[in-house]
Amino acid sequence: MKRVAIVGGGPGGLFTAQILADKCGDLCQATIFEASDRLGGKLVTRTFKSAPMVLYEAGVAELYDYSQFGSDPVRELAERLGLLTVPMSGDTVILGDKILNTDGDIRRKLGPETLTAIDDFHDMCEREISAENYYESYWRDDNKHPWSTKTFGDILDTIPDETARRYIATAVHTDVAVSPHLTNAMNGAKNVLMDHDEYLRLYSIVGGNERLVQRLAETTAAEVVKNAPVSRVAKEGERYRLWYRHSGKTTHRDFDYVVFALPNYWLQNIDFDGRKLRTALDAHLAHYDHPAHYLRVSCLFKEPFWRSKVKGSYFMQDVFGGACLYDEASRHPGKKYGSLGWLIAGTAALAMTNLSDQQIIDRVIDSLPKPLAEGRDLLLEGYVQRWVGTVNALPGGNPAHDLLQRHRPEPSEHPGLLTVGDYIFDSTVNATYDSADFATDLIMTELRDQKYRPDGNELAPSAANAHALGADYHDAYAHDKTYEESYAEYFDENYNADLIKVIWGDKAPYKLLDVGSATGITIELFDRIGIECWGIENSAHIHARTLEKWKHRNFLGDVRNLPFENNAFDYVYDTCLCYLPDEDLDQAISELFRVVRKGVFFGGITSDMTKEVIEYHELFDGVQSLMTAWQWSERFMKNGFRMAINDPKVLKKVWRIECQSNEGDYPWYPDAKTMRMCFYSKPTGK
């Protein structure tokens, strides 16, 4: 049983522990070290002293809903934990004393030219970043985009109408959390698009957002050590030694893996022993060192005085550079009371942290516009929560690094030291979950590899086998049966055809390349249902058994150097990439990209297939590149492909086909989300 230390008991640490238990809880035991006496980090829900039944969010204000695109793991987790959600929306912006609830208000109070300029800017952002790209986050495309080298201020200054510019800057300020010149245009534009329902929606947890981390803490299988700030980490042999302060003394424990689930600025307080590790972490910290700041100011009023004039769960006001005011009672009903929560961001938040709580409360109350001035006499109490440096002004860094580099800062000598955080992606709770998901993928892959890979891995391609799989791979393909005797257990031509029809809308006839075609049996089976199939196989041993009828279509060759013209095939069905060494994958995938016109079905072995299937079929035998489906998706997208399934309805149909094909047996993939990462489209015109 391997031991995993998780440093940080906020959402990142709790997500890491929960996902790790789900993926490989039988192979490891986790310990969470939390510096304070509380788990939960930035998810903080509190109540007012004079009205204990009235809740307010003192930390993370909302969660993001991406379910219209497909899997939304945070929302799915909330449901799994038995938590209910409440939707949030808000379109109102207040400029000066003008309350702008609708486009009609903007046209009437600011003028039609201003409304046109606002709409034009939003349209421009939509043209540059589609909803699909927003969800998938094709970070390599972002790196190449001209806006990655411009500031958000640069593109705001292209707005011809100054009032329209002020409107947009106000509306987006608390999302970017910095002045426009301190973040790039891509990040700014993505935050502009957050106001569009077709890009994302917002929600909160009933009973308070903190309920999410409370339920995780209640259900975690991890050991939890509170009041235990970690001060130092060092490599000791093949393990990692962690020093921490607890109960008045410094002690240490050894672990096989260490996951630092901390904000970037907290990570800077840990001493990393050894020059190589220290310099790698210095580079990691420097890449993400773009601090942004928040203040949460929560005030209780005798009544919700604003509701007759302002609509929605929240509204924006052009004070403090652009503040967001949350109608807390709209999501946490508080009987007769009203509760407003100010979210103040950027340099204004940083400057105001030097003021006392009362001074800050006085300033926000004084900032109410004339139409809402009555609220100044209705205040009952207020509280301030400071979140200095807790988010990233340039999430993901610029340029964005690949996911391995983001999560494994020093891979050569310290592969078991991993980082998790919202700053690695997009500074949201959802991003924290994604980061924890990827980091635990790396741990799971290594643990499963150690447990399930046969000793010696004699079947792996080698120089002795002309860099092909050993002969026994096909001669004892399944429980001592040859490939020819057992292939039907693993292959169904109708299954493949049904998937292509659902995903790409194609029916036979079309042309398909089977990469890893063995004896070419698949060529005949596809031919029976009208699909013109060709094959490529690099094992001379199994290729020699190709039927005479199909020798002209079943080539002995190498996926790294395909003997076909560009765009020669409509589709590729691959089962061989996982048997290549990692250093050859990009060349092989780029060859698939070259010869295919429409899409690829990646049917190779992944480390996150179901445990039962891995054990029963000894799937890791001969595999050289063992990765999760997510890691494979990164490799395909690196070489030009895009995800083929972007419609949840299509994914449901695909998953139904998969479940029907495995009826009575264990499924090969744990869920639809994982299987989605088996299908890739070639962008048109490439």
Image (cartoon, rainbow, N blue to C red):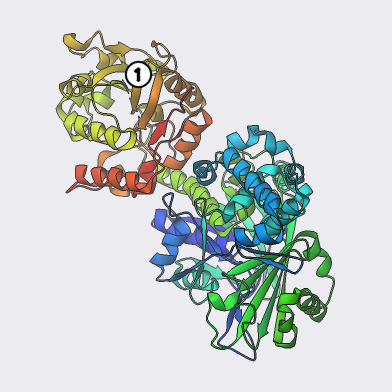
Q: Residues within 10 Å of mark 1 (few under 14, many from 20)?
A: many
Indicate whether 467 appears above or below 669.
Answer: above
* Viewer-side residue, 631 vs 204: 204
* Viewer-side residue, 103 vs 413: 103
Image coordinates of residue 502 in percent, x first then y, are 29, 37
- Mark 1 lies on residue: 569
- Residue 228, quarter of the rendered image: bottom right
* Viewer-side residue, 686 vs 439: 686
Image coordinates of residue 52 in percent, x first then y, are 58, 88
Left/right placement of residue 32 relative to residue 316 reads left
Res. 338 in view? yes
Res. 232 in view? no
- Residue 295, quarter of the rendered image: bottom right
Element on which disc 1 rests: strand
Image coordinates of residue 232 in percent, x first then y, are 70, 57
What residue is drawn where x is 51% and y is 45%?
Answer: 131
Image coordinates of residue 240 in percent, x first then y, are 60, 52
Left/right placement of residue 431 relative to residue 83 reads right
How many numbered discs sit on the rendered protein? Answer: 1
Q: Quadrant of the N terminus?
A: bottom left
Q: Amino acid at mark 1?
A: Phe
Indicate whether 59 appears above or below 272.
Answer: below
* Viewer-side residue, 16 vs 384: 384
What residue is drawn where x is 47% and y is 31%?
Answer: 636
What residue is drawn where x is 62% and y is 82%?
Answer: 304
Indicate whether 492 appears above or below 286.
Answer: above
